[in-house]
Amino acid sequence: MKGGDLLNTEKLPVEVRKRVIAYCHQLISLYQDNLKSIFLYGSVLQSEDFIPKKSNINLGVILYDLQLSELRKALKLVAKGRRKGIVAPLFLTVEHMRTSQDSFPIEFLQMKENYLLLYGEDFLKNLEINRENLRLQCEQQLKGKLIKIRQAYLELGLRKKGIEKLLHNSFSSLLPTFRNLIRLKENKIPPVSKEEIIREMSSLYEVDGETFLLILRDKQGDEKICRIDAHLFLERYLKEIEKLSIAVDRL
């Protein structure tokens, strides 16, 4: 590969192509021989979830060496990129990726199944994730979320709007876990659509999928959770998460 050549740029969404290409060329110029690869991942590659001028553009950058001085090189580029919808890239090292697959199986699978290589070596292609590591992280995510939601509820006190925000934020952070619960049962690549994930996961684990769908629709402006008392809805939501955590523990 020639020094500044990029890969797969024709596959980039038209709305982001120029921004991403220019950004990658600047990364190549900054890091040169220390740069192993650059890849794009996230909603920008999912037409149904990507909203031009609103959705973030996520890049992964793999370096051989990642001292603070190396991060410092990108400060001006990152600040400039944020104004164009490119969030601070996920900087990783080759060694970190090799030794962290057991610690972050959900995150690595999420990237592996939805990325586009733009420069260098395709390191994600050959990542192997152990099923038990994945099951354990799913269980940790569910049980940890239960603890955090209960604590946040006490801190919110009587503020109804705060409860709705708590539901939205916790639900969004649990979606990758829900997706991988399907993988654990079906041993297949799960769907990407949020509604499909909820419906299939709920059917497999015999939980009330409507609870999660109501939160999804409320966030998208289609329905209102406040038709149901916020405290009662939160109780219903916690009950379904607890059922999932017990089910995963028994897998």
Image (cartoon, rainbow, N blue to C red):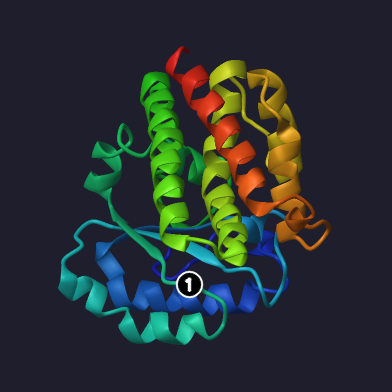
Nearer to the camera, 202 or 87: 202
- The residue located at (36%, 39%) in the rendering is 104
In the rendered image, the vertical position of residue 186 relative to residue 138, given as above or below? above
* Mark 1 closeness class: few <14, some 14–19, many ≥20 residues within 10 Å: some
In the rendered image, the vertical position of residue 84 relative to residue 188, given as above or below? below
Nearer to the camera, 79 or 149: 149
The x and y percentages for residue 13 are 70, 65
The x and y percentages for residue 74 are 32, 78
- The residue located at (42%, 37%) in the rendering is 141
The x and y percentages for residue 120 are 41, 56
Asked if residue 98 lies left or right of residue 149, the reply is: left
The x and y percentages for residue 80 are 45, 87
- The residue located at (49%, 81%) in the rendering is 82
* Image quadrant occupied by the N terminus: bottom left
In the rendered image, the vertical position of residue 62 relative to residue 4, given as above or below? above
Outermost residue, top side? 250
Outermost residue, right side? 222
The answer to which image quadrant residue 45 occupies is bottom right
Q: How many marks?
A: 1
Asked if residue 66 lies left or right of residue 46, the reply is: left
Nearer to the camera, 16 or 237: 237
The answer to which image quadrant residue 51 occupies is bottom right
**Callout 1 amino acid:** Val
Give the secondary structure at mark 1.
loop
Residue under pointer 1: 87
**Is residue 47 visible in the rendered structure shown here?**
no
- The residue located at (58%, 62%) in the rendering is 165
Asked if residue 149 lies left or right of residue 229, the reply is: left
**Is residue 99 visible in the rendered structure shown here?**
yes
Outermost residue, front side? 158
